[in-house]
Image: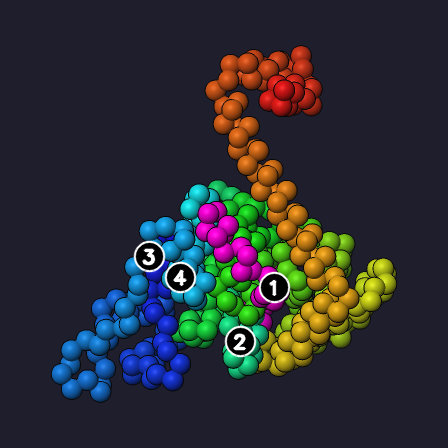
Amino acid sequence: MAAHEAQQHEWAPVERGRRRPQAVREVAGRRPAKLLQLGCLGAHTPDDKSGAPVPFAPVAPLGSTAAELAERLVAGDKRALARAISLVENDDPEGWALVREVYPRTGRAAMVGFTGPPGVGKSTLIGAIVRNAREREREVAVLSIDPSSPFTKGALLGDRIRLADHFLDPGVFIRSMASRGSLGGLSEATLQTALLMDASGKDDVLLETVGVGQAEVDIIDHADTVVLVLMPGSGDSVQALKAGVMEIPDVIVVNKADHPLTDTMVREIRGVLSLGPRTDWSVPILRTEAVKGEGVEEVVEKIAEHREHIRSEGTLEERRRRNLMNEVMELAAVRMRRRLDAAVKDDPDVQSLLDEVVARRLDPASAAAKLLERETS
């Protein structure tokens, strides 16, 4: 995790208007490892007559308390934000204290979620949208969730590769996070991380789920606007249009629209949407070629239009209330499960109860009822 933080945040932001060292301009776009090496050791620039290394701007040491870290985070310190996310992701008590400290400053950023099957171009589309936002001088944070191996528990965290063009932009914060076995396409710490990004002053927070199937719809509990990204020609398109993900989007994007089956895909999507309930918002179906930047401007406009719609209708606060309620219940359920696991782990009475189940003298539901009755009495 320390290496992960360093990759993103060992570089201090370059002040607006200041010229980057020539070495930084030359290595932009290369591997992050090379950039990190230059950032740690200093860079030799052609303009430097002495040949001595030119060090980068110093990075302030981490605060020793949650209050100090919160103060730096709210001031826009990217390294403090990275540290805060790590604390929350690792379920550190200091992380929860930090969220409590900055929570009153949240609620200002636009939360946009991107979901869809693997390989449809979600990361590339997000990269194009980030570029559009930066042209309008908006501060952006991106949280990409990568799947964890069910066997080794590891994750490649490779979604950031498509965002390499923005690594050196001081107005962009990028974080990858493993799902750690969480179902639904997101990680347990997703909403807490999004709140920290919001509190740090970002205008837009973009959430990218893992590649999803038909039932991973947790993104609806975290975003103000949900964008479903699909692509034509990926096999039986009916599978992508089944109930589940098709019921949650506010905007649908058919990426890689240069494919000859794009028109067919759009017609099938329209047919599925026509079977759903009528609402005040008509879900737009947009065509893009994210790798070329085509159609991205229209996607940005529809996202903004949807946000204005739910704000004017009064449903933005309703969505956020629902999202926060679900987060409260989820956190309570997780903590109760951990407490129960710790309480019964070495309890001989529980082991005897389990023996009864194994011997088929007691069914699992009755055993669970007895266990809950004992723990809540």
Q: Position of residue 134 (x, y in %)?
A: 51, 78
| Residue bearing the label numbered 3 | 62
The reply to whether discs 3 and 2 touch (Cβ–Cβ < 8 Å) is no
Q: CA distance from mark 3 to mark 2?
A: 26 Å
Q: Position of residue 232 (x, y in %)?
A: 69, 69
The reply to whether discs 3 and 4 touch (Cβ–Cβ < 8 Å) is no
Amino acid under label 1? Met
The reply to whether discs 1 and 4 touch (Cβ–Cβ < 8 Å) is no
| Residue bearing the label numbered 1 | 111
* Mark closest to the chain's N terminus, 2 or 1: 1
| Residue bearing the label numbered 2 | 138
Q: Residue at x 75, y 63 (%)?
A: 314
Q: Residue at x 69, y 69 (%)?
A: 307
Q: CA distance from mark 2 to mark 4?
A: 20 Å
Q: Confirm whether residue 174 shows in the render.
A: no
* Mark closest to the chain's N terminus, 2 or 4: 4
Against 79, residue 90 (above or below) is above
